[in-house]
Amino acid sequence: MKIHWFFKVLLSLGSLFALWFIFYFGLPVVLPEQHLKDQEVYGIILSNQIWEGDIKITGDISSPTNSRITVLPGTNIKVATKDDKSNFDFNPWHLKSGVNTGEEARGIRTGEPFWDSGEKIQIDLNNLLIQGSFYKPVIFTSDSENPGPFDFNMIRIRKGAINQAVFSNYRRFEIGPDVFISDSIFRNSAECSLCIYYGKPKIISSIFENSLRQSIFIDRASPKISNNLFQNYIGEGIKLDARRLSTAMITNNNFEMGQTVIDITSGGQLGEILIARNIFGGSSKIQIACDTKVRIRDNIILGQVGFSNGCSGGFIFGPNYWSTTDIAAIMREKVVNKYNSYKIDVSNVLVMPPKEAGRK
């Protein structure tokens, strides 16, 4: 009996899916777990691993299976700044070396170094579990004697949990939807200390210091960002491109910065973004796309709030503490970038700072 071509295609696709499923989920179960202590690491990781002691990453790492990397307390991970032993990124643009002396292109600003992926390392892990402690944090940095924010290209994790870790001296750190980060420090990054493109990861009780661009960059994702300290004196705090999808929750954070602390660049989303119970320092600025759906309430706002142009309608603030109850003064000194077709209402003013605002 002849089999119709359609069913032949279905059978082939089913076989390929079965092979992928066995490879992705089966290999980490079948292969023995590896315990690495004071070792060099690079290349493809297929099995579960435990890292301990001094780990030196000397080349790109790729994890194409459902493998898990568990990092024990006190582990010191250093990434080589050159001589990538296992480059997996052959994008011609990423292979470019030197410094961009022209106009900004493909995310590389004027004066910034290119990715130079033949030399610089990137780390792509499926599941990362960092188990640091207060007295024994996990250190994840470069091996440079003169460290900088472009020392290695990228860390990417799709799922996992990070507790009591210190990350520094990298271009960007991309996290997936099933990532939980707590009590960690992110410093001296180039593009974004954390980049979030989808899902609802959680970033709790952490500290962000000195990123050249943003401490956290959000594109369509809906993370929960709570109880963190932002001390980025170079770049922005949080930049959010909602693209009609984001319903991020930004609550109970302290923004001790002198520039843009939150920048919502687009709106029109179906749900609402929540900015609540935060403390914004006196030199800070919140910039909001005029068509975004956002609730701003129960914050201590000592800086300014501005809106993009091009919309009609208006915006109503929830109850916030502005350091004054004079509505005219708030509209004159605190709310900037005003225009006639967009009405702003700040009449719901708190007389006293809300006790629940800020980090706990």
Image (cartoon, helix red, strand yellow):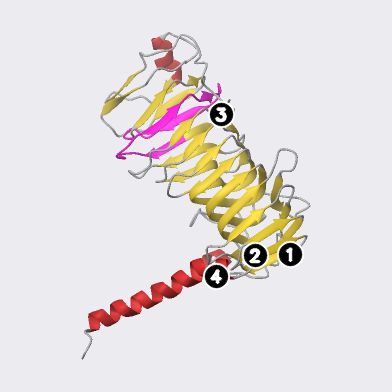
Residue 7's disc is none
Residue corresponding to mark 3: 255
Q: Amino acid at mark 4?
A: Leu
Q: Amino acid at mark 3?
A: Phe
Side of 349 relative to 167 (left or right): left
Query: Between disc 4 and disc 2, whose residue precedes?
Result: 4
Q: Amino acid at mark 1?
A: Glu
Q: Residue at 63%, 51% (x, y): give it.
A: 170
Residue corresponding to mark 4: 27
- SS class of the residue under badge 4? helix
Q: Gap between marks 2 and 3, in whole Å?
A: 42 Å
Closer to the eye: label 2 or 1: 2
Q: Gap between marks 4 and 3, in whole Å?
A: 45 Å
The reply to whether callout 1 and callout 3 are in contact (CB within 8 Å) is: no
Query: Between disc 2 and disc 3, whose residue precedes?
Result: 2
Q: Gap between marks 1 and 3, in whole Å?
A: 38 Å
Q: Which residues are magenta?
A: 263-292
Q: Residues within 10 Å of mark 3 (few under 14, many from 20)?
A: many
Q: Does the stretch in magenta take in 270? A: yes
Residue 173 at what x, y percent from top left? Answer: 57, 51
The C terminus - image quarter:
top right
Residue corresponding to mark 2: 33
